Image (cartoon, grey):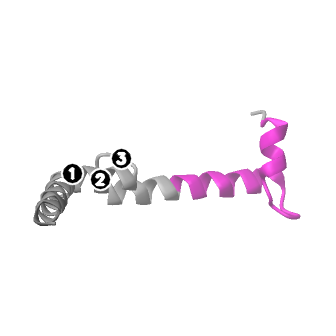
Amino acid sequence: MTIPDDIVGQLDGGDAPLQATVEDALRSLLEIRRRAAEHDAEGLPFWLRREAGQKGEIDESLRDRVTQRRAAENES
């Protein structure tokens, strides 16, 4: 397997051989993906998942604020 030079330059393994550094990086990536899959079964990024779950609440909240502002403007 050939690793592009720009990627090799980003791998910081200190005095460790390149093979060990690449293996550590791959294991770290796999662990990150595993944890992400545990927390989000749909595979959505966390910021999209939260927004999607709260969409109705946000819409209602904004509607209530607009109604309150209009009522306050009419009273003035």
Quarter occupied by residue 20: bottom right
Mark nearer the viewer, 3 or 1: 1
Q: Which residue is mark 2?
A: 51
- The picture quadrant where one finds residue 4 is top right
Helix, strand or loop: magenta stretch? helix
Residue 62, x across and y down, in percent: 20, 56
- Can you name the residue that lies furthest to the front here? 76
Q: CA distance from mark 2 to mark 1?
A: 6 Å
50 or 60, which lies in front? Answer: 60
Distance between the Cα atoms at labels 2 and 3? 11 Å
Residue highlighted by disc 3: 44
Task: Look at the image and give the residue range highlighted in magenta.
Answer: 3-30
- 63 to the left or right of 47: left
Amino acid type, mark 1: Lys
Do labels 2 and 1 touch, CB within 8 Å?
A: yes
User: What residue is rendered at 15% in x and 54% in y?
Assistant: 63
Q: Which mark is residue 29?
A: none
Q: Amino acid at mark 3?
A: Leu
Q: Position of residue 6 (x, y in %)?
A: 82, 40
The residue indicated by pointer 1 is 55
Q: Earlier in the sequence, mark 3 or mark 1?
A: 3
Q: Residue at x 84, y 38 (%)?
A: 5
